[in-house]
Image: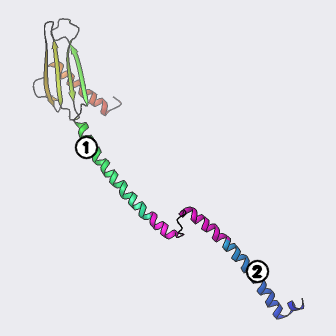
Amino acid sequence: MDDLSTTTGIVAAVAGLIAIVALVVAVVAVVRLRRLSAQQEIVLGDTGKSDLVGHASRLQAEFGVLHDYVEDVAARLDERLSAAELRLDGSITYHGLVRYDAYNEMSGRQSTTVALLDATRSGVIVSSIHHRDSARMYAKLVRDGKGELTLSPEEELAVELALSRELQAEDPSA
């Protein structure tokens, strides 16, 4: 104990305390380093490499490849959608049907007129006129909602009916 009262003893005691504190700090640092290594291994996997910067760089490169792939797929989908829209514009979009007695003979409205129009309001009108002895069928082209030939009142009604459905489709509140 006498050695602790001298200057040499005090310096030795302080040095011992500093050594113990340094040992504790080193143990804590080692424990934290092991935890960090374990967490890093979870992130990196069992690749055997423990370089977070390299891993981040590889991830960035892979995201770039993925981004390019997604943009390529989106461009192809846009092309396919454009082609589908063109095909849909040519399909029958609006239709109207009118039944009537062509000869006013009370035959049960056996005559019919059908208007079949596409998105450009063009298409065909087919009329089937029934009489007791015969039946006749007529077809007329329609461009932009107007007949290329003069339309009968029933044919005009069929076109109006089809186009009124166009207006209802545009305005759901109608």
Rendered image quadrant of residue 100? top left
Name the residue carrying label 1: 83
Residue 80 versus residue 126 in the image, above or below: below
Mark 1: secondary structure: helix
Query: Which amino acid, by three-letter code, is at mark 1?
Result: Ala
Give the camera-side residue of 72 and 105. 72
Query: Which amino acid, by three-letter code, is at mark 2?
Result: Ile
Rendered image quadrant of residue 90? top left
Mark 2 vs 1, N-terminal side: 2
Residue 121 versus residue 129 in the image, above or below: below
Residue extent of the magenta highlight: 31-59
The residue sitting at 42% across, 61% down in the picture is: 62
The residue sitting at 54% across, 67% down in the picture is: 48
Name the residue carrying label 2: 20
Prevailing secondary structure of the magenta residues: helix
How far across and down, in percent of the image, does residue 11 sit?
79, 90
Residue 77 colored in magenta in the image: no
Rendered image quadrant of residue 117? top left
How far across and down, in percent of the image, does residue 88 sit?
26, 37
Q: Residues within 10 Å of mark 2 (few under 14, many from 20)?
A: few
Residue 39 colored in magenta in the image: yes
> CA gap, disc 2 to disc 1?
78 Å
How far across and down, in percent of the image, does residue 70 sit?
37, 54
Q: Which residue is situated farthest in the bottom direction here? A: 7
How far across and down, in percent of the image, does residue 103 sit?
15, 9
User: Looking at the rendering, in which quadrant would you find the N terminus?
Assistant: bottom right
